[in-house]
Image (tube, helix red, strand yellow):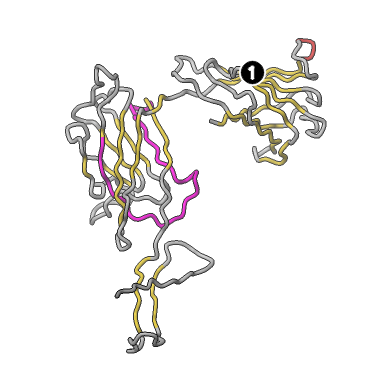
Amino acid sequence: STISLLFRPTNTIGSPGFIAVTGPFGFQIATACSVNLERLNSLGESIQELSGLSCRGAPQPTNDAEVHISASTGDILALESYRLQIEVTNPLSIPVDPGLWRVQSYRSAQAGYENLLDIGEAPSFPLTEVFHTLEVTYPPYVNPLDLVLELTIRVILRHAVELGDAIVIYGPEGYDFALPAVTGQHALEHRGCRNFEASSLHLLPSPVCLGREIRFIFQSGGVALDTNQMLTPLMQFKVQTAYPRRTLDSAENQFHGDHVRGEVVVSSKTVQGETVTPRLQALSVQRLDTRIAVGSPSALTLSFSPSQAADALHISTGISQSG
């Protein structure tokens, strides 16, 4: 994951100085780490991206790293606001105390006390454990005339589901699992899900859906862990979404799951969705003349509604040959 650290140095940091970053116990920063440093204005907006930085973690990755400044970087100015972003690996277990992030600046390449300029600490963020399994399977074939897309979703958790817990699955932007609102229902009201079908009916309650959200609320019982594997049994179900009408980039095309207990997220996981190409809506072809002989020119009318704006239209024909 990417950590953002905001700070304002009391003293200017110039070459050959550096910034030392120490994360809470359990975090790991790669030996050849990735870093980005920006100067911000009073609104917290980036106004300068500093170049020429070198990020160095330990030979055996730990929670420490050094961000060294070159002559081409320029000075990190006193009392200016900066945002330092660094790639880290989260701990494998959830600590009781999230701990602190520490940032220290030095005037030279040596980390001696005599070279120390500034030091600052900020509380870390709480971590949640990941689902053991969150899998989304798309159908191998979809009829070109289908207006929905059926998905199979599988979930296995590392924590038992208790009475009152919720499991919430979020689809990518543009997915819609909810049945159309009927008379008397508000458009933003949770309602039934499109063609929901559970393979493990004794485990899952009937969900409610709203847009891209599928929510299971365990009001009459929970799901215990298997005493041998210390995992929940497989919870599998099928559900349909209205056929997506947006082309998504990789960051948007993701499924996310949360196991929620009250206000606490017990565990979560994010997985990538498959690429789905939106379709032209209400596509129809009509012949405007009676010329049906082989090789004869013919006039056609194509009618459709695009799912999203486009810059060009490509039309091709499929020719079947027999005999």
Q: Residue furthest bottom?
A: 290
In the image, the segment drawn in magenta is 236-265
Query: Quick check: is 241 in the magenta stretch?
Result: yes
Residue drawn at x 28%, y 28% is: 165
- Quick one: 121 or 72, which is closer to the camera? 72
| Relative vertical location of residue 253 with respect to residue 302 in this rendering, above or below | above
| Relative vertical location of residue 2 with respect to residue 94 in this rendering, above or below | below
CA neighbours of label 1 inside 10 A, class few (<14), some (14 to 19), many (20+): some
Left/right placement of residue 150 relative to residue 95 reads left
Residue 139 point in image, percent of width and height: 31, 49
| Relative vertical location of residue 109 with respect to residue 298 in this rendering, above or below | above
Q: According to the image, label 1 marks what residue?
A: 58
- Quick one: 300 or 131, which is closer to the camera? 300
Residue 80 point in image, percent of width and height: 73, 31
Residue 18 point in image, percent of width and height: 74, 23
Is label 1 in a helix, a strand or a loop?
loop
Query: Quick check: is 274 in the magenta stretch?
Result: no
Amino acid type for the residue under numbered disc 1: Ala
Residue drawn at x 47%, y 23% is: 126
Which of the image's four quarters has the C terminus? bottom left
Q: Residue furthest top?
A: 113
Residue 83, by quadrant, is top right
